[in-house]
Amino acid sequence: MKILHTMLRVGDLDRSVAFYSEVLGMQELSRKDYPHGEFTLVFLGYGPKETHPTIELTYNWGVDSYDLGNGYGHVALEVDDLYGTCDSIRDKGGKITREPGPMKGSDHSIAFCEDPDGYKIELIEKLP
């Protein structure tokens, strides 16, 4: 078994695709409209779906926001330079919700950012 993707429902597909591609550097891998179901799926990631987990953005036509509830935690991304990544996210209009620094009870550094729909993304500095 392997993880294939994480699905997020989004209220503005173009805004969300721009965030994941322009701010986080993912590539749009596929996009398909489902007219009979009135939704669009876009898959983004850092490599081909066959070998890399992806983010699936689901846009239900006519729905512009969702209640995130309290069950969702976050998606985690490993980064080479945590402070530089946070600066880059800010420079591109992204929102850092937890500044870079050690995780509580650890020397391992993390930060959090938020996508346009309010989903949290943990940034974990790659260990040497």
Image: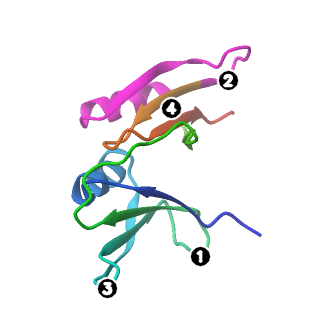
Q: Which mark is residue 50?
A: 1
- Considering the numbered disc 3 on the image, is that residue within a helix, a strand or a loop? loop
The amino acid on which the numbered mark 1 sits, given as a three-letter code, is Glu
Residue 80: x, y in percent? 54, 37
**Pointer 2 local density, CA inside 10 Å: few below 14, some 14–19, many at least 20:** few
- Taking 4 as reference, is 67 above or below it? above
Q: Which residues are magenta?
A: 81-109
Amino acid identity at mark 2: His
Residue lying at 36% horizontally and 41% vertically, measured from the top left: 115
State which mark lies toward you, 1 or 4.
1
N-term-proximal mark, 4 vs 2: 4
Q: Is residue 91 left or right of residue 55?
A: left
Q: Which residue is mark 4?
A: 81
111 shown above or below 94:
above
**Residue 26: horizontal and vertical position, in percent?**
41, 56
The quadrant of the rendering that contains the C terminus is top right
Marks 1 and 3, how far apart in space?
27 Å
State the mark number for residue 60.
Answer: none
Mark 2, residue position: 108
Give the residue at the far right of this rendering.
Answer: 1
Sequence-wise, which precedes: disc 1 or disc 4?
A: 1
Q: Which residue is mark 3?
A: 36
First in residue order: circle 2 vs circle 3: 3
Q: Earlier in the sequence, mark 1 or mark 3?
A: 3
Mark 1: secondary structure:
loop
Q: Are marks 4 and 3 in contact (CB under 8 Å)?
A: no
Q: Image point 38% across, 38% down: which residue?
A: 118
- Using residue 126 as the reference point, say whether residue 120 is left or right of it: left
| Disc 4 element | loop
* Residue type of the residue flagged with mark 3: His
In this rendering, position of residue 51 left or right of residue 38: right
Measured in 3D between alpha carbons, the distance from the residue under mark 1 to the one under mark 2, in whole angstroms, is 30 Å
